[in-house]
Image (cartoon, grey):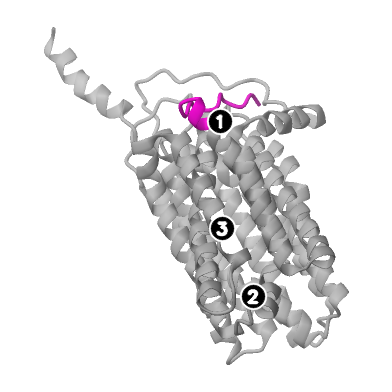
Amino acid sequence: MTNTAVAAGPQLAAETAEPAFPGRDFRALWTATGISQVGSAVSNVVVPLCAAVALNASAAQMTWLAAAELVPSLLIRVPAAAWSDRLSRPRAPLMAWCNLAQTIIMGLMPLLWWAGVLNFWLLLAVAVAASFALGVYSALSSPVLVRIVPKSHLVAANGKLSATRSVADIAGPALGGAILAVLAAPAAVLLDAASFLASATLLTRVRAERTPQAGGNSDGKADAAAPQPRKPKQKPAPLGVAGNFRLALAMARHSGVRAMVSVAFVNGLVQPVLVLFLIRDLHMRASLIGILLAFGAVGGVAGGMLVGRLQERFGPQRTVGLGAVASVASLALLPFAATGLSGMAGLVLLELAGSLGGTLLIATVFGGLQAAAPPDKIAQVMAMAWVLLQAASLAGVAAGGALAAGVGLRWAMAASFAVLAGTLLPQLARWALARWAPDPPIAA
């Protein structure tokens, strides 16, 4: 062996080694995501208050506002994902442009208010535009994550992002309340606009969008000595209506996705019932409810930071199983609790175990989907997964409202537990009988 060959060995190993995690690009994406999520969590409190207090919106108008914040993102997600998968240019700069658009959109609200022309329908238009921008941003984010994070660390990366979201869900409303003590509701939205501007700035630092086919070193730079593959002459075709239908069916056969859909449906069932049940049946004070709900952040952060280690030790299927067990346990006490300590313990268990289980499920299943999806279908696979979860949650909200009206609050909570246990416990038994064998990859 020549000296040149000996010297080339370590160099080749260094060039083909996986990049370190978390690397510079992921840290920039992670920080950008966290900042924008805190700002959005502030707006989730401030915008409805702006509609209710500053604009005197009716109950029907508040329903329209809630739909405007969710439905446009749901509708645009799949077509935006097809466009994202066809892109041949880096997506991180486009994500930054989406956040700049959000800066302008959210900044319009206080400007319109200061000009004295803000009304409910203009507020609704702002909410629709922001939801569309969020849908496009989401379609771009998954391919970027896959290209800057090694496949073996995708579950850990999703866990860190989920943990950040849990912190934002608690810190955002608290920060929004503090701002509302000194500013009117429309003016407080400026914090959300500023958070999107800061996030856009950080996204410009995400530069190493490596592709699975391209040669490169650990910094994401192309190796000049390595032969570069030819670029395809034709861009990959989107799945289309029939392809999306087949993808949805394939996901419905994936046991991990089914578990997430079950949890999303039950979360929807509980959403319109929980606060009324706590106040009317358990006679819990509003201030105490707010304090106990904060335990959700603890569970979410714990799940997000532990999921990577759990997967390394137990494997993906057992980690999903742990998430399912925690999710079932979360509702095991509250529907049957009484006023006092048992009710408080039930709410803490619901928030702590529910957010822990949900984070383990989402981080593990999403990380597996991102790692297994074809490189030119990553955005479409992840968009379909989100659409299934959001559709299940919406269906659960409608069913939960009907149950509460038909059988009462406590029986609606008990039915939620029965649905969760009835769908997840048989799945856990099937996983155990199959010796926790992972699901086959979803064909896109």
Amino acid type at image mark 1 = Arg
In which quadrant is the C terminus drawn? top right
**Between disc 2 and disc 3, whose residue precedes?**
2
Left or right relative to 122: residue 248: left
Disc 2 from disc 1: Cα separation: 35 Å
Disc 2 from disc 3: Cα separation: 16 Å
**Residue visible at 48% across and 55% down in the picture:** 356
Q: Which residue range is magenta in the image? A: 430-444
**Between disc 2 and disc 1, whose residue precedes?**
2
Residue 278 tag number? 2
Q: Is residue 275 above or below residue 226?
A: below
**Between disc 1 and disc 3, whose residue precedes?**
3
Q: Are marks 2 and 1 in contact (CB under 8 Å)?
A: no
Kindly identify which residue carries mark 3.
332
Total tally of numbered discs in the picture: 3
Residue 60 appears in the picture as rendered: yes
Amino acid type at image mark 3 = Ala
Question: Hey, which quadrant is residue 246 in on the image?
Answer: top right
Q: Is residue 56 above or below residue 305?
A: below
Kindly identify which residue carries mark 1.
430
Q: Name the front one of labels 2 and 3.
A: 3
How crowded is the residue under tag 2: few (<14 C-alpha within 10 Å), some, or many (20+)? Answer: many
How crowded is the residue under tag 3: few (<14 C-alpha within 10 Å), some, or many (20+)? Answer: some
